[in-house]
C-alpha cells in the first residue's frame, strides 16, 4: 500500500487532513536543503500517520515533505540523541526538530557532556502547545479539555538554542481544567497518611517495564541502578515496596534535570501520574535554589552544585 | 505502644559525627541505645537509596549526620549532601513519609553531647510516631507471612 510508504500524506498538500502551513513548508525546505547539501545524514521529526503524528527518520531529501508540525507532535525526539541509543548515532549527523521543551532536554545533554553542539543541527518550531492524547487522525485546535496540562504556562514556546527557527508565533496554550500545580497543591493539602496512601496505590500499579526510563531523554546512565544486582539496591520484582524505591529513585535522579516534557507519564502503560513527582521536584529546586530549567547549557544544574549559604532549616 | 523500641539507622561520616559519637561513648554519656551506626567516609557518600533501603529492611527512623559546613574533610562533600538531602527530605514529605522519621544533623568530633541530644530526640520522635508499619505493609506477601 502506498499509504504505508508515504505515511498519511495526500497529494493535495495536506498532512493528515490539515492544511500545510507556511511554517511546515519552511520546515520541509530547511530539512530538504540540509539533507541535499550533506549537512546532516538524517532528519528526525514528525510525520502524519493514521493514528496521529509519529516520529519519522528522513534520509532522502525527496521525502522531506513527510515532515509535519502541529499540536499532535507530542513526542520529545531528543530521546534519540540519548547516548544510550548508539544505533541512532550510527546513522550519521542528525538534524533534529525540537519544540521549546525539547530544546531544554538538548541543553541538559550538552550541560552534562553527553553531546557536543556540533553533533546535531537543531530546527526549532514555534509551539502553541500540544495535545495530551496525540492519536488524532487530523490536526485539531487545542481546548482546555485536550491540551497537555504541562503546556499551560510554558516559558519556552520559542527555543533559543536552535540553528533554525520556523513557524509563525503561536497563541498561548489554553488553561486545562486543572493545572499540574493545582493538582500538587490539592495533594499537599491532604494529611501525610492520605498522600502516602495515594502514592503507594499509584506505585503499586507499576509493572516495572521501565518505559519511563527508556523514553526519558535525560536518563543517560549506561547501567541503571535499577539493573544492578550486586548489590541490588532496587528490588526488581513488581511489588509495592520495590516499586516505591524505583519510582522515588527515578524522580530523584532527575531532580533539577527534568525538563517536564511529560514523556515518562505519557508512556507509562498503567497511568502513574509521574508529572506530579517531576513537577514537585521542579518546585523544590525553584523554591530552595531559585533554579528553573531552561535551554541554556551554560546554566549549572542545582544538584551537583552548591552555595555556602544554602538553606538548612531541616538540619539540626 | 509502651513496649515499642524504635530501630534507628544512623549514617554518619567518618571524620566528624563518628568521632563525635565515639566521644559520647568515651565520655560515658547516657543516651538511648536504639541507634545502629553505619560509618561512611563522608555525608557526600550517602545515597538517598541507603535511607530507602534502611526503611525497607525495617528501620523505623534514620539519622544522617556529618561535618558542619566549612568542616568537611573533603572540602565540599557536606555541601553537596545538604542539597541532595534537602530535595530528598521534601519529596519524601510529598510522598507521605513523616519528616520526623528522618533526622539530619551536623555533629563535629568534639560534640559528643550534641550527638546524645540528636539521638535522644530522634528516638523520642520515632517512639511517638510508632513503628513504621506503613512501610512494612509494602513488603511482598511471602515475606510478610515469613
Image: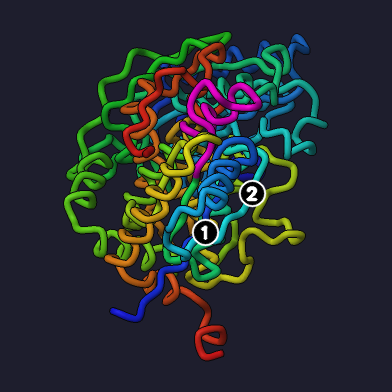
Residue A200 falls in which quadrant of the image?
bottom left
Query: Which residue lies at the image location 42% right of the left edge and 53% below the top edge?
Result: B119
Is residue A74 shown above or below A198? Answer: above
Chain-order first, disc 2 or disc 1: 1
Tag shown at residue B9 = 1
Which chain's residue wears label 1? B
Q: Name the residue carrying label 2.
A: B39
Query: Which residue lies at the image location 57% right of the left edge and 38% below the top edge?
Result: B43
Query: Which residue lies at the image location 39% right of the left edge and 44% below the top edge?
Result: B89
Which image quarter is the C terminus of chain B in?
Answer: bottom right
Tag shown at residue A70 = none
Residue B131 falls in which quadrant of the image?
bottom left
Question: As drawn, is B11 to the left or to the right of A154?
Answer: right
Is residue A298 shown above or below A178? Answer: above
Question: As drawn, is A86 to the left or to the right of B53?
Answer: right
Query: Which residue lies at the image location 41% right of the left edge and 30% below the top edge?
Result: A70
Residues A276 and A193: in front is A193
Span colored in magenta: B65-83
Element on which disc 1 rests = strand
How would you rate the neighbour count of disc 2 (Cα within 10 Å): few for under 14, some for 14-19, many for 20 or more? some
Is residue A229 shown above or below A188? Answer: below
Amino acid at each position: 500500500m502506498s499509504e504505508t510508504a508515504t505515511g498519511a500524506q495526500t497529494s493535495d498538500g495536506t498532512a493528515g487532513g490539515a492544511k500545510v502551513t507556511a511554517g511546515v513548508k519552511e520546515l520541509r525546505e530547511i530539512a530538504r536543503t540540509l539533507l541535499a547539501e550533506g549537512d546532516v545524514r538524517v532528519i528526525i521529526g514528525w510525520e502524519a500517520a493514521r493514528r496521529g503524528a509519529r516520529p519519522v527518520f528522513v534520509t532522502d531529501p525527496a521525502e522531506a515533505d513527510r515532515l509535519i508540525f502541529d499540536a499532535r507532535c507530542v513526542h520529545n525526539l531528543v530521546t534519540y540523541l540519548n547516548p544510550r541509543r548508539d544505533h541512532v548515532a550510527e546513522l550519521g549527523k542528525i538534524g533534529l526538530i525540537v519544540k521549546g521543551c525539547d530544546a531544554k532536554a538538548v541543553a541538559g545533554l550538552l550541560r552534562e557532556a553527553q553531546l557536543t553542539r556540533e553533533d546535531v543541527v537543531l530546527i526549532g518550531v514555534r509551539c502553541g502547545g500540544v495535545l495530551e492524547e496525540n492519536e488524532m487522525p487530523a490536526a485539531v485546535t487545542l481546548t482546555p479539555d485536550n491540551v497537555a496540562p504541562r503546556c499551560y504556562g510554558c516559558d519556552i514556546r520559542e527555543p533559543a538554542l536552535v540553528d533554525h527557527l520556523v513557524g509563525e508565533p503561536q497563541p498561548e496554550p489554553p488553561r486545562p481544567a486543572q493545572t499540574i500545580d493545582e493538582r500538587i497543591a490539592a495533594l499537599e493539602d491532604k494529611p501525610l497518611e492520605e498522600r502516602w496512601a495515594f502514592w503507594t496505590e499509584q506505585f503499586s500499579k507499576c509493572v516495572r517495564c521501565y518505559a519511563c526510563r527508556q523514553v526519558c531523554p535525560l536518563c543517560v546512565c549506561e547501567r541503571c541502578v535499577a539493573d544492578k544486582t550486586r548489590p541490588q539496591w532496587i528490588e526488581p520484582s513488581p511489588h509495592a515496596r520495590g516499586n516505591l524505591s524505583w519510582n522515588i529513585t527515578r524522580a530523584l535522579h532527575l531532580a533539577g534535570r527534568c525538563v517536564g516534557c511529560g514523556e515518562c507519564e505519557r508512556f507509562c502503560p498503567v497511568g502513574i501520574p509521574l508529572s506530579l513527582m517531576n513537577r514537585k521536584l521542579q518546585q523544590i529546586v525553584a523554591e530552595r535554589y531559585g533554579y528553573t530549567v531552561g535551554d541554556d547549557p551554560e546554566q549549572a544544574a542545582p544538584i551537583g552544585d552548591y552555595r555556602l549559604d544554602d538553606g538548612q532549616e531541616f538540619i539540626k | 505502644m509502651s513496649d515499642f523500641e524504635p530501630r534507628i539507622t544512623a549514617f554518619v561520616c567518618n571524620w566528624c559525627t563518628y568521632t563525635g559519637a565515639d566521644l559520647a561513648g568515651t565520655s560515658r554519656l547516657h543516651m538511648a541505645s536504639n541507634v545502629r551506626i553505619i560509618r561512611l567516609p563522608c555525608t557526600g557518600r550517602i545515597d538517598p537509596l541507603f535511607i530507602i533501603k534502611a526503611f525497607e529492611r525495617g528501620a523505623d527512623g534514620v539519622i544522617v549526620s556529618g561535618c558542619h559546613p566549612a568542616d568537611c574533610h573533603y572540602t565540599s562533600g557536606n555541601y553537596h549532601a545538604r542539597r541532595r538531602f534537602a530535595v530528598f527530605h521534601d519529596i519524601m514529605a510529598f510522598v507521605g513519609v513523616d519528616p520526623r522519621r528522618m533526622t539530619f544533623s551536623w555533629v563535629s568530633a568534639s560534640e559528643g553531647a550534641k550527638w546524645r541530644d540528636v539521638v535522644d530526640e530522634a528516638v523520642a520522635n520515632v517512639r511517638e510516631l510508632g513503628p513504621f508499619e506503613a512501610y512494612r505493609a509494602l513488603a511482598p506477601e511471602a515475606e510478610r507471612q515469613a
